[in-house]
Image (tube, rainbow, N blue to C red):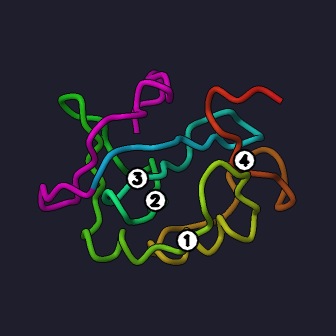
Amino acid sequence: MQTDIDPRSLIGRKAFDRRGAKIGTVDEVYLDDATGVPEWAAVRTGLFTRDAFVPLEPSEFVDGSLRIPFDRALIKDAPDFGVGRHLSPEQELQLYRHYGLDSSPSPGPGPDRDFGRLAGHEE
């Protein structure tokens, strides 16, 4: 995903799956604690439904909306951890596995690094 985008600007934007089907609206953005890079978005999937966590990499911000390169069904079946809370490393690993993404650590902090700080929430 483009790293020069303010993660707060994603909140309220529409999110679409790989086929262009609307999934919902970005509710929250989670940052990697070690790097500050936007890592996950919570997408509200409907009026009375829950938020689904989606990876911001390899998603794209195109024409004012978030394009997520996965099928809607896979996104809606993502593990539900609730929003407004910190994602633990274990929860993030579950999400990586759900989406079939490589979860190997990036250069920098080791495997004990912490994830999931909410964008705009300073501690």
- The mark that comes first in sequence, 3 or 1, is 3
Is residue 21 shown left or right of residue 66?
A: left
Cα separation, mark 4 vs mark 3, equals 28 Å
The residue to which callout 3 is attached is 43
The secondary element bearing badge 4 is classed as loop
Residue 100 sits inside the magenta stretch: no
Relative to 96, is 55 above or below?
Answer: above
What kind of residue is marked 4? Pro
Q: Position of residue 76 (x, y in %)?
A: 36, 71
The residue to which callout 4 is attached is 107
**Which quarter of the image is occupied by the C terminus?**
top right
Q: Position of residue 60 (x, y in %)?
A: 31, 42
- The mark that comes first in sequence, 4 or 3, is 3
Q: Identify the residue at horizontal 54%, vertical 67% (top origin).
A: 102
Relative to 97, is 30 above or below?
Answer: above
Which quadrant of the figure has residue 73? bottom left
Magenta-drawn segment: 1-23
The secondary element bearing badge 2 is classed as strand
What kind of residue is marked 2? Asp
Residue found at the very far left of the displayed protein: 20
What kind of residue is marked 1? Asp
* Picture disc at residue 80: 1
Cα separation, mark 1 vs mark 2, equals 7 Å
- The mark that comes first in sequence, 3 or 2, is 3
Is residue 116 shown left or right of residue 10?
A: right
- The mark that comes first in sequence, 1 or 2, is 2
The residue to which callout 2 is attached is 51
- The mark that comes first in sequence, 2 or 4, is 2
